[in-house]
Image (cartoon, rainbow, N blue to C red):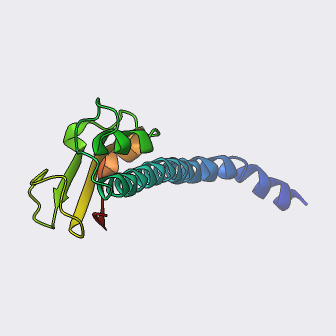
């Protein structure tokens, strides 16, 4: 009986030490999951904005600016409201006929493909994750449709 009590006293703090070691890894995994969810949400916003922009560009809507209503860039910015900071003109490119030449001969002739590309820097807001992967992730999506 004495041996059992003596052994129990020697291991009293072992579980606290084990928890302290495991909790660091657990917190790191939880913050990584939260950051991944946030970044994935922003990626979905970028994809949706590119698709919406391509849809409007295929209707021969002018490329315009984010600040001008009824333009492709305005529609892209409106289709991605979850991005903070929001999209501006430098994040959105509209090119015709696969040339990569932005706004060249836009709006295009009927039947030509028009591509809208959206690029966004998604900030890393979790301190531990930011130390590991860097300050931001670059999210890019492109959508191509034919001009109707």
Residue 79 in picture, x, y percent from top left: 43, 44
Residue furthest to the top: 67
Horizontal side, residue 28 vs residue 69: left or right: right
User: Quadrant where the N terminus lies?
Assistant: bottom right
Q: Residue at x 82, y 61 (%)?
A: 3
Q: Residue at x 9, y 54 (%)?
A: 104
Residue furthest to the bottom: 111
Residue 26 in picture, x, y percent from top left: 57, 52
Q: Is residue 123 visible?
A: no
State whether residue 85 is above or below residue 44.
above
Residue 119 in picture, x, y percent from top left: 26, 50
Q: Residue at x 39, y 47 (%)?
A: 129
Q: Is residue 57 visible?
A: yes
Count how many numbered circles sit on residues in the image.
0
Q: Nearer the viewer, residue 120 or 108?
A: 108
Q: Quadrant of residue 89?
A: top left
User: Quadrant where the C terminus lies?
Assistant: bottom left
Q: Nearer the viewer, residue 141 or 39?
A: 141
Q: Residue at x 84, y 60 (%)?
A: 4
């Amino acid at each position: 009986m004495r041996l059992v009590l003596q052994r129990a006293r020697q291991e009293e703090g072992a579980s606290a030490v084990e928890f302290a070691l495991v909790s660091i890894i657990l917190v790191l995994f939880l913050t990584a999951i939260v950051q991944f969810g946030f970044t994935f949400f922003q990626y979905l916003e970028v994809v949706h904005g590119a698709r919406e922009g391509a849809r409007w560009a295929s209707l021969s809507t002018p490329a315009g600016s984010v600040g001008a209503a009824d333009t492709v860039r305005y529609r892209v910015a409106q289709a991605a409201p979850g991005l903070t900071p929001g999209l501006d003109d430098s994040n959105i490119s509209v090119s015709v006929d696969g040339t990569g030449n932005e706004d060249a001969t836009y709006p295009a002739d009927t039947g030509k493909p028009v591509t809208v590309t959206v690029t966004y820097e998604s900030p890393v807001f979790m301190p531990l994750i930011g130390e590991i992967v860097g300050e931001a992730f670059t999210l890019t999506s492109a959508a191509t449709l034919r001009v109707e």
